[in-house]
Amino acid sequence: MRSNEQPADSLGSGCGPSCNHDLPIAARPISRRMFLRSTTAALAVTGIVPNRLFAGQSSSSAAETKVKELFDSFSADQKKALCFPFEHELQRKVSANWAITPSKIEDLAEPQQEMIESILKGLTSEDGYEKFQVQMEKDGGGLNQYHIALFGEPGDKNFEFVMTGRHMTMRADGNSIDKVCFGGPMFYGHAAESFNEGPSHRGNVFWYQAVRANEVFAALNPDQRKIALVEKSPNEDAIDHRATGYAGLAVGQLSSDQKELVDRVMADLLSPYRKNDVDEVLDVLKANGGLDKIHLAYYQLDQDGKNGDIGKDGVWDIWRMEGPGFVWHFRGFPHVHTWVNIARV
């Protein structure tokens, strides 16, 4: 699962009028109450409120309904090019920059392109949809330059829709893949203005997540920082689950105030996605032992031995949250790459 992404030319400036993530974190406050209201379950993860089960998406969810409509619209030639058996080897692949099928979305009929846009809307929150639109336009030339594939047949017990391209692997599975969040491993990223963004990450629609994570590091005491700060990161795409041996500081070792900051990180990580997927992640996280089992690691060097603190500004660009059945690896050097793998274990 190694990325073969190459440097790109300048991809434009800024992230549009809807993007406010160049602002200091204080300019974008989110209260604990707002987080609970938006995700419905942050405290359930930490065990402060009674356990509840959250319903995952189903084959009748908005995105999956559009997947079925799209499948039914395919011609025989389109099905031959875009449809594969369930559990085909391509289904579980994840990468930073790849075409799951050779054809692009622009090669489909206009009504089919509109269906795919509706699928993207169905998989994301309103804010997340705007972010992914900006990301795809800057990184790949827009949604129509991306690629899709379907595995299995929508309406059957098992199926999955996958969309890929530069800085994207996104899935819709109707919750037909048992115990797995987001339909399997996924990837998102962004190179806002150039391949090498620099310490400001100006215009990057996902950099706010790293700013939030660094709020936690800033709140650690010296002894906690010694544990949380790790010399060298693993390969960014090393997201297979491990039962033990997590790097960094366990959330369970934090104070209640510090845990609230971790709640904010989790809220920001999940904020681009639809509520059903958010609920499923929180349900799985709780079933795997809760947020206390997750470790936070901040890396001084990346996988190739390069600086993990661009500009030496005290903001760690590379960090990871990892625990039972949970990996969320964020690499901000030279631009944002994020690898995710979450499942019930």
Image: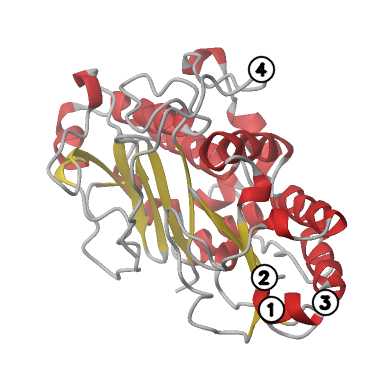
| Crowding near the residue tagged with mark 2, few <14, some 14–19, many ≥20 C-alpha atoms within 10 Å | many
In this rendered view, identify the residue nearer to me: 290 or 95: 95
Please name the residue shown 74% across and 37% down the image. Answer: 126
Residue at mark 4: 17
Q: Sequence order check: which comes first, mark 4 or mark 2?
A: 4
Please name the residue shown 44% across and 62% down the image. Answer: 289
Per the model, the C-alpha gap separating discs 1 and 3 is 19 Å
| Residue 340 x, y percent position in the rendering | 45, 56
| Crowding near the residue tagged with mark 3, few <14, some 14–19, many ≥20 C-alpha atoms within 10 Å | few
Please, is residue 131 above or below residue 345 in the view?
Answer: above
Q: Quadrant of the N terminus?
A: bottom left
In this rendered view, identify the residue nearer to me: 141 or 239: 141
Q: Sequence order check: which comes first, mark 1 or mark 3?
A: 3
Residue at mark 2: 173
Q: Are marks 4 and 3 in contact (CB under 8 Å)?
A: no
Q: Sequence order check: which comes first, mark 2 or mark 1?
A: 1
Residue at mark 1: 159
Q: Sequence order check: which comes first, mark 1 or mark 4?
A: 4
| Residue 339 x, y percent position in the rendering | 41, 53
Q: Which mark is residue 75?
A: 3
